[in-house]
């Protein structure tokens, strides 16, 4: 193992790790937004809105995220969407992650006992009040852990933007593998940084999960 | 430049060939990941600790890093140690091992949740420990986790698009090649997405059949 080489190039990997972190944060924010909207659509009273929600989930979960990125980044200009690679990465991955999060959020909401809503309505709360004051606070507790799984997948999925040349961790590893022919060392560098990011995020999710549980 | 789908039919054969490759790679990697998952689970649970602990560490690394990065490691790493495999074999190995680790996690939990009495009964009727595992415990464990393994296989199909990056001419790379000639990325990537969607539906159908066949009706 070539430790000298690793010591020489690691600052570039650290720099790239920050790009991966920034990508992950922005993607997570967009993903959560899309997920919340998607779940609202899937639980709507109107059949058409429900259909749009279901189609969103089905299409974005039924095709590879890489292809979705390519359509947006390479195909976008043909329909008047000009994005740089980083923007396309965040938007493409965010919409993709949103489809998975839609199901997580919806799953948590529908797993709340029907009696809760009925009781709230009986007490005179409106449909919205029952949702915001009674159901969502309970569902939010159930969401933390599965959303954490989504987040873990999302962080690893940010590697895909290497394919549209965003200079993040995987792209940096790929470039140095190409120039140094030391695949194992470069994998180790990038791998350790990914593991740190994922470990810290996992601990954060576990902390939040403990925080929101009753008792 | 607007959209023009009229060029699509003339390249349909290239795209369809890409589909065939995608299906072939997915099936091969799925089979590898299934049996690999069983073997990994047995190692992680029953091997000597000197094998078990490093093995668990490697599995943990594989679950904490992106598949794309692992594909680069396997493809270029094999070349470095003098094994020059065709890209599609490296792709199948990379995809297969990655998902074997995920399957192994499911199978480990399932093996541990098979009633202890099963092992004891098998030992009582004279089976050795490994026979009891192979013929009694593992079949029951695997059967219990077929649906979540099926979900992993669907994920595998979509992740098979990543092997285009190491130069395997499956659906994604076929679309890229056609786009190189026609400069129509939107049309052909959309078409590739449509084919993935259809393959996905087909795969879900096959998995449902398998699940129905394998599940014990009580």
Image: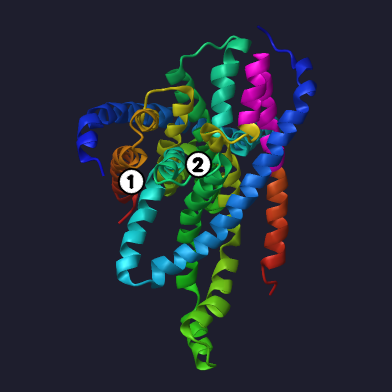
Residue B183 visible somewhere in the drawing: yes
- Residue A137 seen in this snapshot: no
Residue A24 sits inside the magenta stretch: no
Q: Main secondary structure of the magenta part?
A: helix
Q: Residue at position x 32%, y 43% from top?
A: A195
Q: Chain ID for label 2?
A: A
The reply to whether the C-beta atoms of the residues labelled 1 and 2 are less than 8 Å apart is: no
Task: Residue at 60%, 56% (x, y): give it.
Answer: B31
- For the view shown, which residue lies furthest in the front direction? B82
Q: Which residues are magenta?
A: B173-200
Q: Position of residue A162 (x, y in %)?
A: 44, 28
Which element carries disc 2, helix, strand or loop? Answer: helix
Q: Residues within 10 Å of mark 1 (few under 14, many from 20)?
A: some
Q: Position of residue A10 (x, y in %)?
A: 24, 32
Q: Which mark is residue A105?
A: 2
Q: Nearer the viewer, residue A28 or B175?
A: B175
- Nearest the camera: A73 or A56? A73
Q: Which residue is mark 1?
A: A202
Q: Quadrant of the C terminus of chain B?
A: bottom right
**Residue B215, image x and y in percent?**
67, 67
- The numbered mark at residue A212 is none
At a point 43% along the width and 39% down the height, the residue shown is B76
- Where residue B132 appears, as percent x and y from the top left, is 52, 82
The quarter of the picture where residue A40 lies is top right
């Amino acid at each position: 193992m070539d430790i000298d080489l690793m010591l020489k190039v690691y600052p570039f990997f650290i720099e790239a790790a920050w790009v991966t972190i920034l990508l992950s944060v922005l993607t997570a924010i967009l993903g959560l937004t899309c997920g919340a909207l998607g779940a609202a659509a899937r639980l709507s009273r109107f059949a058409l809105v429900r259909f749009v929600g279901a189609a969103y989930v089905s299409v974005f979960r039924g095709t590879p995220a890489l292809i979705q990125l390519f359509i947006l980044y390479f195909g976008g200009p043909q329909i008047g969407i000009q994005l740089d690679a980083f923007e396309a990465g965040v938007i493409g991955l965010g919409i993709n992650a949103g489809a998975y999060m839609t199901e997580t959020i919806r799953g948590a909401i529908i797993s709340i006992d029907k009696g809760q809503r009925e009781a709230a309505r009986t007490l005179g709360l409106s449909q919205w009040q029952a949702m915001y004051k009674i159901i969502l606070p309970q569902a939010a507790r159930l969401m933390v852990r599965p959303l954490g799984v989504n987040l873990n997948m999302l962080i690893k999925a940010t590697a895909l933007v290497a394919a549209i040349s965003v200079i993040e961790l995987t792209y940096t590893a790929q470039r140095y593998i190409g120039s140094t022919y030391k695949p194992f060392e470069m994998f180790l560098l990038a791998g350790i940084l990914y593991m740190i990011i994922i470990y810290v995020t996992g601990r954060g999710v576990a902390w939040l999960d403990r925080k929101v549980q009753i008792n | 430049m607007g959209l023009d789908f009229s060029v699509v039919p003339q390249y349909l054969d290239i795209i369809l060939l890409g589909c065939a490759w995608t299906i072939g790679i997915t099936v091969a990697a799925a089979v590898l990941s299934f049996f690999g998952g069983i073997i990994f689970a047995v190692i992680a649970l029953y091997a000597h600790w000197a094998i078990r602990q490093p093995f668990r560490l490697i599995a943990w690394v594989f679950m904490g890093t992106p598949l794309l990065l692992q594909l680069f490691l396997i493809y270029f790493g094999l070349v470095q140690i003098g094994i020059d495999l065709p890209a599609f074999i490296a792709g199948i190995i990379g995809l297969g091992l990655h998902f074997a680790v995920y399957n192994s996690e499911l199978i480990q939990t399932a093996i541990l949740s098979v009633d202890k009495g099963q092992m004891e009964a098998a030992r009582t009727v004279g089976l050795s420990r490994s026979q009891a595992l192979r013929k009694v415990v593992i079949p029951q464990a695997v059967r219990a986790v077929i649906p979540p393994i099926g979900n992993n296989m669907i994920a595998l199909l979509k992740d098979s698009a990543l092997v285009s990056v190491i130069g395997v001419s499956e659906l994604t790379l076929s679309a890229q090649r056609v786009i190189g000639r026609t400069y129509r990325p939107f049309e052909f990537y959309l078409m590739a997405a449509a084919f993935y969607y259809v393959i996905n539906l087909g795969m879900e159908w096959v998995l449902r059949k398998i699940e129905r066949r394998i599940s014990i009706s009580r």
